Image (cartoon, helix red, strand yellow):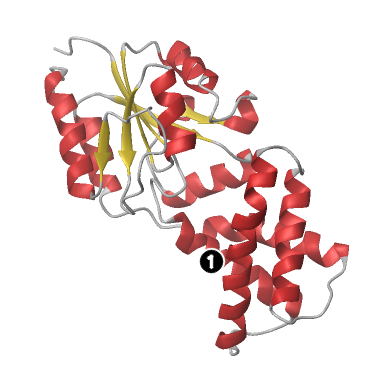
């Protein structure tokens, strides 16, 4: 028998799938649409996307510190990248069209990491609650989840825009704990600041999916630092076994 109610929750982007790959594909799709280009000019596309990623990072701190709104962040990074790539000026309508096309289609480019399905199958066999805690727009995030075809109960999907609290606030983890009524809670995420720090503050077990081998920036140490899918699966299995979970 299971000695305590165990629950594993996962971040979505760059944890269940390669968000960077889908972000690039969706961004180029929207870029071609507003520039009326096909995919023939690969050199220009790559030049623009390199600029775009640079300005995504450049303006991120201003957005994170709430110096600019999300809409301003999206507009500034696109306009700056277009200018840097030597492209013509674009209207406000075209800028909005780019973002709308991106958000409407980004889910079409997502594919789950191959090993995620294995983890979910194991959790299902051992009768363990599992779900998603994600920041973002409900429309965009739910389309991604649907595209991934992951068998996750609706009641265990928590998206910041729906529950009105977002990471890195630990309150989102307190909210989920109260809803789940589990005594042993684990969170798997790729972002140290957005995922690990608030999970630790909320007294969850923090499992860092860290294939890029980032270093820790303060004293909030995750309980596990997993550089590979093998390490991540081994950590999850150890917790399953230690909890005394029974097979279905």
Residue lying at 25% horizontally and 34% vertically, measured from the top left? 224
x and y percentages locating residue 80 in the rendered image: 74, 67
- Judge whether 241 appears above or below 65 on screen: above
Q: Quadrant of residue 88?
A: bottom right
Vertical order, 73 against 92 (above or below) = above
Instruction: Quadrant for the N terminus, please.
Output: top left
Question: Residue 19 location, x and y as percent?
Answer: 47, 55
Q: Residue furthest bottom?
A: 40
Q: Give the x, y percent position of residue 47.
A: 59, 79
In the rendered image, which quarter is residue 90 located in? bottom right
Tell me how many marks there are.
Answer: 1
Reading the image, the residue beneath label 1 is 24
Instruction: Count residues near mark 1 (Cα–Cα under 10 Å), then give few for <14, some for 14-19, many for 20+.
Output: some
Q: Name the quarter where the C terminus is drawn.
A: top left
Q: Is residue 119 left or right of residue 167?
A: left
Question: Is residue 119 visible in the rendered structure shown here?
Answer: yes
> Viewed as shown, does residue 208 lie left or right of 147?
left
At x 59%, y 31%, the residue is 160
């Amino acid at each position: 028998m299971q000695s305590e109610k165990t629950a594993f929750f996962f971040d979505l982007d760059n944890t269940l799938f390669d968000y960077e790959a889908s972000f690039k594909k969706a961004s180029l799709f929207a870029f071609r649409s507003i520039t009326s280009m096909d995919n023939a000019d690969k050199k220009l596309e790559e030049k623009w996307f390199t600029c775009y990623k640079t300005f995504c990072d450049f303006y991120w701190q201003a957005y994170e510190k709430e110096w600019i709104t999300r809409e301003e962040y999206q507009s500034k990074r696109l306009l700056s990248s277009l200018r840097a790539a030597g492209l013509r000026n674009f209207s406000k309508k075209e800028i909005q069209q780019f973002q709308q096309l991106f958000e409407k289609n980004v889910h079409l480019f997502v594919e789950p990491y191959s090993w995620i399905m294995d983890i979910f199958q194991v959790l299902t066999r051992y009768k363990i609650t599992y779900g998603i805690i994600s920041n973002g727009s409900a429309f965009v995030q739910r389309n991604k989840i649907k595209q991934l075809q992951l068998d996750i109960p609706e009641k265990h999907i928590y998206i910041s825009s729906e529950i009105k609290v977002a990471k890195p606030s630990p309150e989102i983890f307190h909210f989920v704990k109260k809803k789940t009524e589990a005594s042993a809670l684990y969170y798997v995420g790729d972002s140290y600041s957005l995922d690990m720090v608030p999970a630790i503050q909320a007294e969850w077990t923090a499992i860092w999916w860290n294939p890029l081998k980032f270093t820790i920036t303060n004293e909030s140490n995750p309980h596990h630092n997993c550089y590979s899918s093998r390490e991540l699966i081994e950590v999850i299995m150890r917790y399953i076994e230690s909890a005394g979970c029974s097979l279905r």
